[in-house]
């Protein structure tokens, strides 16, 4: 499903490009493309996900105790 924006009447190209970039960022398209640029071993995927999960757990514990 392609991402598209319609240029509004009187809108500059700079603003339209900025809106397109924000939309791509919100839908995580840029993030996915960068992640899939190179092959990532399954062990690296697990290690990365575990690292993110550990960080989130650390934050959760920090704010529960505070």
Image: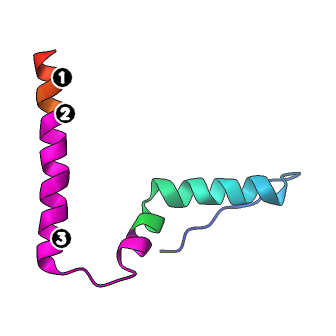
How many numbered marks appear? 3
Left or right: where does residue 58 sit relative to residue 32?
left
Q: Position of residue 43 (x, y in %)?
A: 11, 75
Drawn side of residue 7 relative to residue 33, left or right: right
Near mark 1 (Cα within 10 A), the count class, few <14, some 14-19 or many ≥20, is few
**Image marks 1 and 2: residues in contact by CB distance under 8 Å:** yes
Query: Left of 6 or right of it: where is 66?
Result: left
Instruction: Give the residue displayed 60% in from the left and 59% down from the top.
Output: 21
Instruction: Identify the secondary structure beneath mark 2.
Output: helix
| Residue drawn at point x = 18 percent, y = 41 percent | 56
Q: Which residue is mark 1?
A: 63
Residue 27 coordinates in the image, percent (x, y): 44, 58
Identify the residue position indicated by label 3 in the image. 45
* Inter-mark Cα distance, 1 to 2: 6 Å
**N-term-proximal mark, 3 vs 1:** 3
Which stretch is magenta?
32-59
How far is the residue under mark 3 from the one under mark 1? Answer: 27 Å
């Amino acid at each position: 499903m392609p991402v598209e924006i319609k240029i509004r009447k009187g809108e500059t190209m700079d603003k339209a490009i900025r809106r397109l970039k924000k939309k791509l960022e919100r839908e995580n398209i840029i993030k996915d493309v960068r992640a899939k640029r190179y092959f990532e071993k399954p062990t690296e995927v697990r290690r990365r996900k575990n690292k993110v999960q550990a960080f989130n757990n650390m934050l959760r514990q920090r704010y529960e105790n505070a």
